[in-house]
Amino acid sequence: MTPRSFTLFTPAVSLIGLSLLLTACPADDVTADEEGTDTAGTTGDTDTTGTGTDTDTDTDTDTEGEDDVGDSCGDGILDAGEECDDGNTADGDGCSATCTIASCGLVWSAIESVESSNSSGVGIAVDAAGDLYTVGQRANNDNDIYVERANGGGVAWSVSFDSGNGNDAGFAIDLGPNGEVYVAGRMEADADAIWFASLNPDDGSVVWEQVIDGDVAGEDDLATGIAVTPDGDVVVVGQIRVGEGDDDVWVSKRAAGDGSEIWTSTWGGVGDGSFSTDRSDSVTVGSDGEIWVGAREHIAFDTQDATLLHFDADGGLVAAFQPQLGGSHTHNPVGVAVDDSGVYFAIEKSDFPLRSWTYRLGLDGSEQWVKTEEDWALNSEVVLGEDWSVRGLSVNGAGELMVGGRFLNEEPGEGIEWGEAWVARVDASGSFLCRGHYMEDDGSVIPPSLSIAGVSGNSAGNFAMTAQLNAGQGQATWIWTGYFAE
């Protein structure tokens, strides 16, 4: 099998002249001065002017605060010269022993030229060794599913799936306990059908694949998520047509060995009397085998509610949570992740202006905290860009949330804007452990724009992202992949 051509580059070296801009953001342990009062030097130095100038009442001879990092780092007071101070001098908690901020840094990235803007990475997974597995859509004579494995040395393998009938696409990917690669998406049958497969991690060859066409002939069905269970089997979610104007969320547990059905459940909202076009998104499975699905319930023509579905290990519906109710809106689910004590659920409003919410919920659905796009955007007292959106969630081995997405940056006053990537890692309380934002820059007046589609992480806390990269000037399109680690 001939590997596809990737151009690989690191933050320090670019083989095609693209460069990376990384800006670290402060941890939430202590926020910077937003009200005009801060402290500097030792205790008793209080600025009430809002200018950052200290009125010293102690014997500290440091007038600028530069030496305070060595003297007072770890006292829980954000002194001049400190980027953060979380009350200790431990490393690995987002604020280092020298009171500097941890950043989620780019290790390597790659771009692949494609012929059509219909081509894009959509889902991504990362293994313990840092290899990235991407699934998406590539336009050839028609649209095909593609799956690739790559690392800092290039593409290990790339495979395609083509029904021969048209609009095929891959949407989701997950890895099994022994490296098995599970992918899911849409395959043309009599219309769009649910498709999922198991691939050999060594070369991408098919172990088995399944195509599930719904009971309503000629109607569209598709898979949107796949996740491995603690017993090594897989859960596939999608949406399936069950009647005229009636789509249900489809959830099915399948045997790891051959993809055969273990059980299948469906869920549908009440609808508006004429339509009940419910939608599915991602899925995650807890260590207890409980299943959490991001979905959207059709309420009315102008109201769609993001809904978190909770199933037990046997496919029985436990509960449905809708964190945003009331009024006319369309709220889409964009990510779900779970640990042993809670579940994370990200949703966004689809129309202008963009709003996003990332919830930490108890396993009973009780809200513990929520972050909006403004929380992700805060960077050293400066709000960067706009339309900060979440594009994926996962939980690492320490129970920390890994999250990332896209925002729009701009050249003020020039009418020029472009997409950038952002990543963050937070603990269960919502405090930031690392975060940063990233752009590609080819030196043109209008930079290339990243449209992040998939974000994932591994147990070690490393990130993987995939996106479509579009030239700021000209029509060139690439598939972009990035690997990040603190």
Image (cartoon, helix red, strand yellow):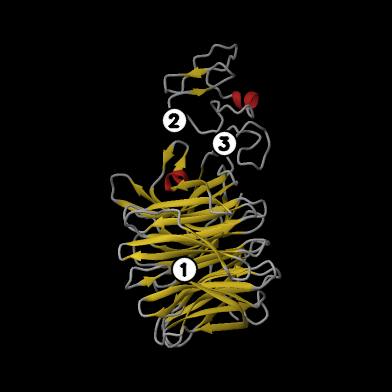
The span from disc 2 to disc 3 (Cα, nearest Å) is: 14 Å
In the picture, the quarter occupied by the N terminus is bottom right
Q: Is residue 389 left or right of residue 230?
A: left
Q: Residue at x 30, y 62 (%)?
A: 302
Q: Badge 3: how crowded within 10 Å, few (<14), some, or many (20+)?
A: some
Spatial separation of the CA atoms under disc 1 and disc 2: 40 Å
Nearer to us in this view, 410 or 289:
289
Classify 378 as above or below 239. above
Residue 101 placed where, x, y %?
Answer: 57, 39
Image quarter for residue 229?
bottom right
Between residues 13 and 345, which one lies in front from this camera angle?
A: 345
Q: Quadrant of residue 98?
A: top right
- Could you tell me the amino acid type at mark 3? Asp
Q: Which residue is mark 1?
A: 280
Mark yes or no: residue 21 visible: no
> Is residue 427 shown left or right of residue 453?
right
Callout 1: 10 Å neighbours few (<14), some, many (20+)? many
**Residue carrying label 3:** 29
Q: Earlier in the sequence, mark 2 or mark 3?
A: 3
Label at residue 34: 2
Is residue 351 visible from the viewing direction of this image? yes
In primary-sequence order, the first of circles 1 and 2 is 2
Identify the disc placed on residue 42: none
